[in-house]
Image: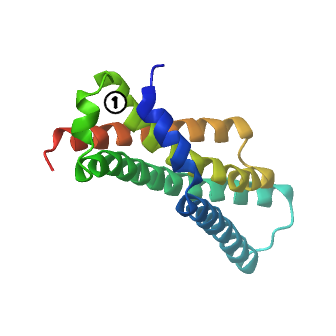
Amino acid sequence: MLLGAVFEREIAFAPRSRGLYIARAVYAGALLAIIATCWLVVTGTQSVATAGDTARFGATLTRILAPLQLTLAMLAAAMTGAVAVSTEKDRRTLELLLVSRLTDRELVLGKLAASLVRVLLLLLAAVPMFAIAALFGGVTFPQLARMFAVTVAAALAAASIATTVAFWNAK
């Protein structure tokens, strides 16, 4: 397998942690609270009478939520990428992994992919919130798909850099 035993071990335990369930619920709840707050601000300051008004609201909401999600995904990916390697160093199990039959590619890509699973699950929790924004109008589902693709690519880049630095750093 391309990702190896490290990824299989991490994928068996990481998505089932209680903290990840709580993080997904808090993230989706925070996005829903932002949507509700924006709706209350818009309806409190101007009348929403036509479909064009709701479409403008949906587009504005997406312009607010998309950069927020991009930033949070990049920070979370960088943090989980670095923590995945530093945990192995702190437990002194990285040396054991290095002398095992795992190839360098399996070790690095396994740690990288396992750290990205958490971020991808958070992004998956945000899909219904962005679908709500799309239902208002002003943004289409293909646009949302492209936005999520950019977010995943940026998270991958951030996690790659953080994992590289964590492997390279002595402590």
Residue shown at the point (80%, 52%) measured from the top left: 135
Q: What element carries label 1?
A: helix
User: Which residue in the protein does label 1 denote?
Assistant: 107
On the image, which quarter does residue 105 sit in? top left
Residue shown at the point (38%, 29%) measured from the top left: 109
Residue shown at the point (52%, 54%) measured from the top left: 69
Q: Which residue lies furthest to the left in this view?
A: 170
Front residue of 74/23: it is 23
On the image, which quarter does residue 63 sit in? bottom right
Depicted 151 relative to depicted 18: above or below: above
The location of residue 37, given as percent across then percent down, is: 66, 74
The location of residue 56, given as percent across then percent down, is: 71, 56
Color encoding of the figure: rainbow
Front residue of 2/43: it is 2
Depicted 41 relative to depicted 115: above or below: below
Identity, as a three-letter code, of the amino acid under mark 1: Leu
Residue shown at the point (47%, 38%) measured from the top left: 9
- In this rendering, the count of numbered labels is 1
| Left or right, 86 with reference to 170 | right
